[in-house]
Image (cartoon, rainbow, N blue to C red):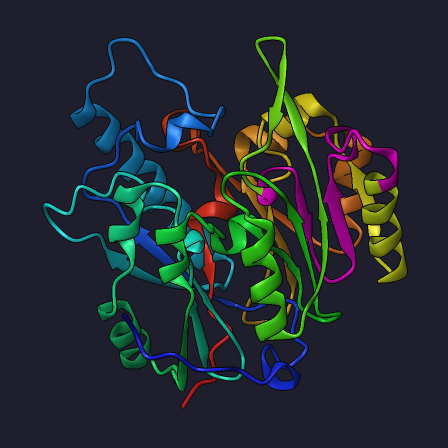
Amino acid sequence: MYEYAIIAREHLDMAKQNTSHLLMIRPIAFEMNAETALDNHYQQEVDGLSDAKAQTQALEEFDNFVIKLRQVGVNVIVVEDTPNSKTPDSIFPNNWISMHGNGTVVLYPMFAPNRRKERRMDVLDILKDNGFRVDAILDLSPAENDGRILEGTGSLVLDHENSVAYACLSHRTNVDELANWAKLTDYKTVSFHALQDVEGELLPIYHTNVMMSVGQEIAIVCADCIKDETERNLVIDSLKEAGKEIVLISEDQKSSFAGNMLQVVNDKDEHILVMSTQAFESLSTEQIETIEKTNRILHSSLETIETLGGGSARCMMAEVFLPEF
């Protein structure tokens, strides 16, 4: 168990919505994770694709993505996955760690047992070596032993500036652990149920960040997934109250990972909305024009990672809000 620290919310994120610093984990043995496929219905097997070929393709997609981010002035700290770790989803670090402006690192309880091995204290040393300060660790991971799962910024889509966390409830987002997190961080939560059609059956969407994204001035939302009208209005009204321009995406666009975007800033303080090429190509001309009023769009092909991993661009980027030395 890691050191436990109660954090003071008024300094948690210093009211910054975006960062220009990202942590990304370079995969060593990427493959389809059978443990997460139990409730991640975005994962799909590819006939004839060996694990070795999947790793090769995923690594190429990862490296090209990092190059594109760095080319536009985003600072990416790349950490190699550990050899022989058997962590096929390590490429998605945002689920086990979040890093905040007051120097606090939060560690989260994970659903799949093999994903729990992704938590690595040496990553904090690497962050320190890159000039970032870690003052406290809030370790929520023991809750996983009781089935109270809360998978970081997969479960939580954060409006940092307004201290609001959006969360669709599922096996990966436990209502009691969400309440515990909110109490410790003094965030307001907007929780709801989001469903998707899986072979004719409506099932919970496993992570909030596949159906919505919140930036400083814009929000991308698949409101059609929120079947309860009261809950849907709660989400929309909260975003409007925060002054967000809402871009509504369809359920088909959501299935192309159009909700799995992240707004970052570069070294010139320009807003960049990061997404996969599949997500970008699903957008309409009108949606692109709305986004480009306040953001530069960056997209990269992540086909193998999306198909086998069931996650996309946002899942691969863990934001580093930590103060610098």
Could you say where residue 12 lies in the image, as x and y percent from the top left? Answer: 58, 79
Residue beneath the point at 37% across and 43% down? 64
For residue 85: magenta? no
Q: Which residues are magenta?
A: 208-230
Could you say where residue 145 lies in the image, as x and y percent from the top left? Answer: 34, 53
Q: Nearer the viewer, residue 18 or 231?
A: 231
Residue beneath the point at 22% across and 32% down? 56
Could you say where residue 187 lies in the image, as x and y percent from the top left? Answer: 68, 69
For residue 210: magenta? yes
Residue beneath the point at 51% across and 58% down? 72
In the rendered structure, the answer to whether residue 48 lies left or right of residue 186 reads left
In the rendered structure, the answer to whether residue 216 lies left or right of residue 233 reads left
Q: Quadrant of the N terminus?
A: bottom left
Q: Nearer the viewer, residue 273 or 93?
A: 93
In which quadrant of the rendered view does residue 80 lie? bottom left
Of all residues shown, which one is farthest toward the bottom?
325
Could you say where residue 58 lies in the image, as x and y percent from the top left? Answer: 30, 34
Q: How many marks?
A: 0
Q: Is residue 300 above or below residue 54?
A: below
Q: Is residue 186 above or below residue 252?
A: below
Residue beneath the point at 30% across and 46% down? 115
Q: Quadrant of the C terminus?
A: bottom left
In the rendered structure, the answer to whether residue 80 lies left or right of residue 304 reads left
Of all residues shown, which one is farthest toward the left?
84
